[in-house]
Amino acid sequence: MTDLEAALRRAVRGEVGFDVTSRALTTMDASNYRRVPLGVVAPRNADDVAAALAVCREHGVPVVARGGGTSIAGQATGTGVVLDFTRHMNRLLSLDPESRTAVVQPGLVLDRLQDAAAPHGLRFGPDPSTHGRCTLGGMIGNNSCGSHSVAWGTTADSVAGLTVLTARGKRLRLGREWAGAPDGLRDLVDGGLARLRTGFPDLPRRISGYALDALLPERGADVARSFCGSEGTLGVVTEATVRLVEAPRARALAVLGYADEAGAAEAAAGLLPYGPLTVEGMAADLVPSTEGLPRGGAWLFVETGGDSTAEARACAEAIVRAADVVDARVVTDPAGQRTLWRVREDASGTATRMPDGAEAWPGWEDCAVPPARLGAYLRDFRALLSSSGLRGTPYGHFGDGCIHVRIDFDLLTDAGIARFRRFSEELADVVVAHGGSLSGEHGDGQARAELLPRMYGAETVALFERAKAVWDPDDLLNPGMLVRPAPLDANLRFSVLPREPVDVAFGYPADGGDFSAAVRRCVGVAKCRTPSASGPDVMCPSFRATGEEEHSTRGRARLLHEMLAGELVTDGWRSTEVRDALDLCLSCKGCRSDCPVEVDMATYKAEFLDHHYAGRRRPAAHYAMGWLPVWLRWAARTRVAPVVNALASVGPLEAVAQRLGGIAAKRDLPRLAREPFTRWWRRRPSGPDRPGDLVVLWPDTFTDHLSPSVGRAAVRVLEAAGLRVALPPTLRGRGRVGDGTSTSATALLTARRGRVCCGLTYVSTGQLDRARAVMRRTLDLMAPVLETSAPVVVLEPSCAAALRTDLPELLHDDPRAARLASRVLTFAEALERHAPDWTPPRVNRPVTGQTHCHQHAVLGDAPDRRLREAAGLTGELTGGCCGLAGNFGFEKGHYEVSAACAEDQLLPAVREALPGSVVLADGFSCRTQLEQLAGVRGRHLAEVLAEGLDGDGGTAPRG
């Protein structure tokens, strides 16, 4: 391997990675399979590709070309050298609106091509649900399709020409009339004309095997089309000329409700004569919430186009009238359509969990039958599932007869794997009996190539083998795929994981307490690799900042998988590779909501850091910022805030503090409040008893010591809404809610004084023993509150999220933790639930800013939206993460990534805001980032409403 690595480094200009991290990141695609490569090469151009192929050919090492977002059958994994085209060969080279063509490199993400084509009224027809991260090279390799294939066909239908390199270094320009055909290909076709004319099923989604029938003379002998779907086994694409189609000026979406899946499937083919752009289907099993959907147990998503909204709507309504539906809804609003389409697109991840939480896996992800046979096929499919004792929920491209499904295979035991094989063989026969294709979109790979003789017969498969030998006589390119395949039950990625649960701190309730099961959640859908955030989404800010796979949620999950496997990452929890990948995780929790399978990397990071530093010295920032509540309480008790602030304003002294605390030199240290919120509360005159509901206001560390104005504003607004505000007790055991006293002199002498704390800073730095101790002390202090029905109002979103999720998951053995978590409300939730008749003051100003990432991921922001609307605060907040993320942005080595995250959405939104806009930022981190990077003061919603009270006072609740 050393000689191979050295030769590649001499030969190519791009990066060569034979290190543990580079290899670990490419052991898997989005399939059930795993192979450990020797190394990874990121070529800069076609010359690099040719050089890499030459070196690998000399060393007899296989090569796998890898894009992104399209492979779920194992074809993007290999034991040799992986060519990663996403890093450099990812450009749009040209776009010609007149000829409606574009020239692209294989690593170009589809959405980038769509963005460039849109101003010309054009688009690329095929659009897999992974369009935000899938690459054109991967789409060509697998002949990907997407939801619009009923209108615009497959990738092969959109390819005009390909520039490829063969394994022996020949550069070919593939096209029609035998253009670019390697020597021997035409003779092979001429000798097998009869079989090529009769041996291939005629259906829109026949992707399996090699498309040798595209070489027939009556089909134009199209070598480029025949190459599509070859899964990197014939040559390596270095450039592609693709056709674009005219995009409809307007679209409408008809969502048709049916009683069940079979009804929707049988109706789909009948809608095709109306010329829809899509006919997508899914059942209720895959829909977390049916809000916004018409009545029914299954739905067809039928999109129509037109030159105007009225025309598109008319087409959609005509389809509704023609369809025999339970209920229907037609949507022309683009935002509404995007919301509904997201339900369908997220199914690829949602399907990996059964309704009861059991795991489900690919393997029969995309087989296809003639559309008219879909209903009958689904009945047979369901019957086979039942007789095999398996479960799965089909969904997908009903108009093309192509079905996606994840099935609850047991891929961990010998018996389960044997059943997986048996079911695969039997289902292949069912597909063939209906005139179908084993693959209808994502290729055969290892999952189905072994079964191709059942579909094509031995003679046609032998023809495939001869074609492979013509293109790649040395079997250098992606061996074991399509011809002479590896067994479908070999190289399963779960076989290397530990069979017994790993000893961990968190409870992982959704994964049966099994950390391995939590890591297995990542199936490689790669939504975390989207280059730009969509709408309110947060995930994954560090990947968008760096563009590096190891800084994506998927990349980190891959490294944790390899850590548990112990084959490639050999030092377990002490792994520096895993530590370094997790170092740039912001713990934003965006993946907890935006990842379709709800990977929770923030929790996994805290778990890893706890094990990694057990018994060892930690980074200085863990002590400086992990123990921030202790230092701030000490400063408050000793009343040294003015002194600390004065010292921090002296440059050399601040620099010393930054070095000692592991804080980035470009960061300003936040100033301490002269009077903490809790001290203001104690000296505040007692008001008259109020008749309203009692709410307990949580004095989090940030509000108490760094932003007390937020706490004071919240008290004012809550009381204006008619609520009685109290603070948690500060004496353990007998304190009365809100007064910090106890019921007897003896109790005062024996009680231990304390402060409630959510433990967030200890969790985020992986100091979980300390976090548990803090949380248990908090539960002791909160005992009187838990005996009442009072909600706990938390102003800092990150603290609220910690109480809602980290507390019960870390103290899963203490029932009080779940009780406290269930009491936690945000500021807006408290007003909505406990002062429903109160009308907030009318502020009547536009807003800008960002929804806090923890608010988006854990708490939800619907009540905040309604409260802003009621107050006349107009406009939308951005998604993404501010980049400061608690301790993250302050830590040495994180400043550049932190700033890049802020530039992703937050700072541009503030710069482009309307004059007079209110900059909303409920999190202390968000406000600090705005102040330090943009010189802008962000405000908590409570502060904005409190200022509004000076104007009109709000409307008192009806008594």
Image (cartoon, rainbow, N blue to C red):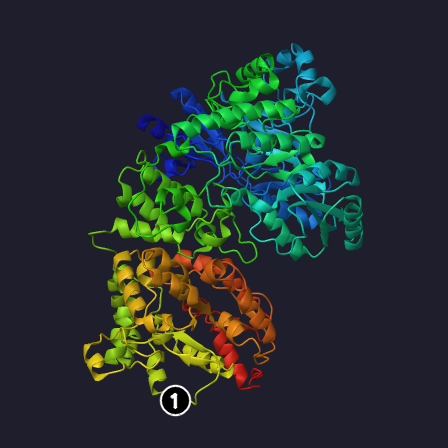
| Residue 757 % position (x, y) | 32, 68
Mark 1: secondary structure: loop
What residue is shown at x 47% (from left), y 51% (from top)? 544
| Residue 869 % position (x, y) | 60, 72
Q: Is residue 852 left or right of residue 99?
A: left
| Residue 241 % position (x, y) | 64, 34
Of 133 and 657, the residue lying toward us: 133
Q: Quadrant of the C terminus?
A: bottom right
Of 568 and 459, the residue lying toward us: 459
Q: Is residue 954 among the parts visible in the rendering?
A: yes
- The quadrant holding residue 697 is bottom left
Of 234 and 264, the residue lying toward us: 264
- The quadrant holding residue 802 is bottom left
Vertical comparison of 949 with 852: above or below? below
Number of numbered discs visible in the structure rendering? 1
Q: Is residue 30 left or right of residue 635?
A: right
- The quadrant holding residue 36 is top left
Residue on which the image places disc 1: 686
Q: Is residue 227 among the parts visible in the rendering?
A: no
Vertical comparison of 181 with 631: above or below? above
Vertical comparison of 253 with 751: above or below? above
